[in-house]
Amino acid sequence: MIQPPFKKILIANRGEIAIRVTRACRELGISSVAVFSDADRDSLHVFLADEAYHIGPSPSKESYLNYRKILEVALKAGVDAIHPGYGFLSENATFVRACKDAGITFIGPTPENMEAMGDKLSAKNLMKKAGVPLVPGSDGGVETVEDAIVITKKIGLPVIIKASAGGGGKGMRVVRAEEEIESAFRACRSEGQNYFANPTVYIEKFINDPKHIEIQVFGDTHGNVVHLFERECSVQRRHQKIIEESPSPSVPNDIREIMGETAVRAAKSINYIGAGTIEFIFDNKTKEFFFMEMNTRLQVEHPITELVTGFDLVKEQIWVAKGKPLSFEQKDIKQKGHAIEARICAEDPITYKPHPGMIRACRHPQGPFLRIDSYAYPGYEVPIYYDPMIAKVITWGETREEAIDRMQRALTEFVLTGIKTNIVLHKSILKHPKFLDGTYTTQFIEKNFEVLEPELFKEIDDPVFLIAAAITAYQDRKSKDVRRLNVASNWRRIGRKIQLRT
């Protein structure tokens, strides 16, 4: 039997990614340690891990973003490595250095990698030196409205103003008319300061109806860097991804090869270690692509790459963090078939507003070539404090059409009641002609898209529905504590060792 790379790993995250890493640890023979906030005491990742520790109140800044508390727990639990998942502390260079100082291995890139690519202006300058194509734009930060107007006139409308340290759609505005420049400039600077403590913004040419194509890269400590092909992430709303697929239906094979080689060159230029993603803007008309940013972490959509390549990216992260070389070379990596991922969120499918609450019934779809990454279960209360994504449905098919059909079938089987979800949104997208022919772009959702509501929704008598909802809420409140006890009891009954330590 192969000796596991670590004895015990703490997973500094929650929800489905914490469960994903826990499963990789168990298969490698590594003990797993979960952490949880007040709101996550009954979360599934807590029950699946070998040990679980309380780290603070529900707000993330007092729990999952409190790296000192997490390190305190890590030392108490005696772990030799920490996996950050994605989000939270996954791209926090200060946390990485604190882990090293504490004698704990951080499973991810170096702090230098994070700092090089964390600031978008710095990243653009590095990519320019590496010969990676860039979108035309300002040479550096833009300090005044007057400068913004001059640069915009030089580039030509439309343009996009971005916060240098931004991400997740924050600090970003598209400008289509000259009179919009001042308000967009001030809004981006304000969001950059408020969200990222950095008001610096820059300006780029805005490509109308682009596609968002990202390349999965992986490096090790021995100088090896490979790519695992592309993922298309163009189905977005407010710059947040909804559906991803691999391979892209729009990228020709010759361009796919060039994009992969370019992404590897970009990663090598900063001596990148671990899993990362080079993100490109892709012009579907000219087939040109331009560097947008690099995510120095595992991505939410990594499962589709795993399904089309056959490699376990989380296990590879763990081995690389131990100092082992990559288990595969570029010539070993092939794309087979087609995979699609749908992000299931507790939110209104029309307004996209989060919809936390108690899950009354939950039945995950099953069947061949179907993967569900989820932390939903009957009786679980989706908290208000975190991202509303509660599950990912991933399907694989020999062809794109088969993967789409399988996804439609899976979504039809997925039962989630008690909360609103975006399942009906996904079903509508998968039926849309532009999605079916692959011509959709990042503007797809914003431009004349309509959710196709099931006939059942249209026939509901509102007064009856509200009375039923009130009765349900009352019953849920009465049985909430009993349900929590039953959840823990069920896990104990099947032999799981639960350690809810505070």
Image: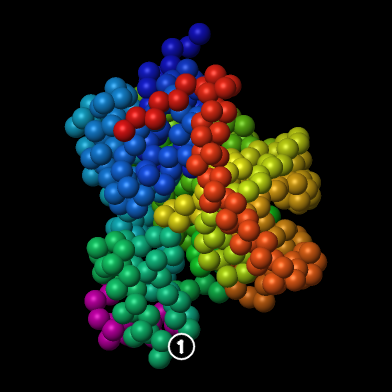
In the orientation shown, which residue stands out farthest toward the top? 1
Asked if 371 appears above or below 161 in the picture, the reply is above
Q: Nearer the viewer, residue 284 or 38?
A: 38
Q: Position of residue 193 (x, y in %)?
A: 26, 68
Q: In which quadrant will I find the C terminus?
A: top left
The answer to whether residue 135 of the structure is visible from this angle is yes
Q: Nearer the viewer, residue 151 or 411?
A: 411
Q: Position of residue 180 (x, y in %)?
A: 41, 87
In the orientation shown, which residue stands out farthest toward the left? 101
Left/right placement of residue 30 relative to residue 332 reads left
User: Where on the picture, by quarter, is residue 394?
Assistant: top right
Q: Position of residue 227 (x, y in %)?
A: 51, 40
Q: Secondary structure at mark 1?
A: loop
Left/right placement of residue 410 relative to residue 8 reads right
| Colour pattern | rainbow
Q: Nearer the viewer, residue 15 or 164?
A: 15
Residue in the picture at 37% in, 43% down: 37
For mark 1, what is the residue?
Answer: 177
Residue in the picture at 30% in, 25% down: 77
Q: Position of residue 302 (x, y in %)?
A: 54, 42
Left/right placement of residue 386 relative to residue 370 reads left
Give the magenta part as a residue range.
138-157
Q: Residues within 10 Å of mark 1 (few under 14, many from 20)?
A: few
Q: Amino acid at mark 1?
A: Ala
The answer to whether residue 219 of the structure is visible from this angle is no
Residue 150 lies in the magenta stretch: yes
- Please give the count of numbered marks on the rendered protein: 1
Residue in the picture at 55% in, 34% down: 487
Residue 313 lies in the magenta stretch: no
User: Where on the picture, by quarter, is residue 112?
Assistant: top left
Residue in the picture at 57% in, 22% down: 493
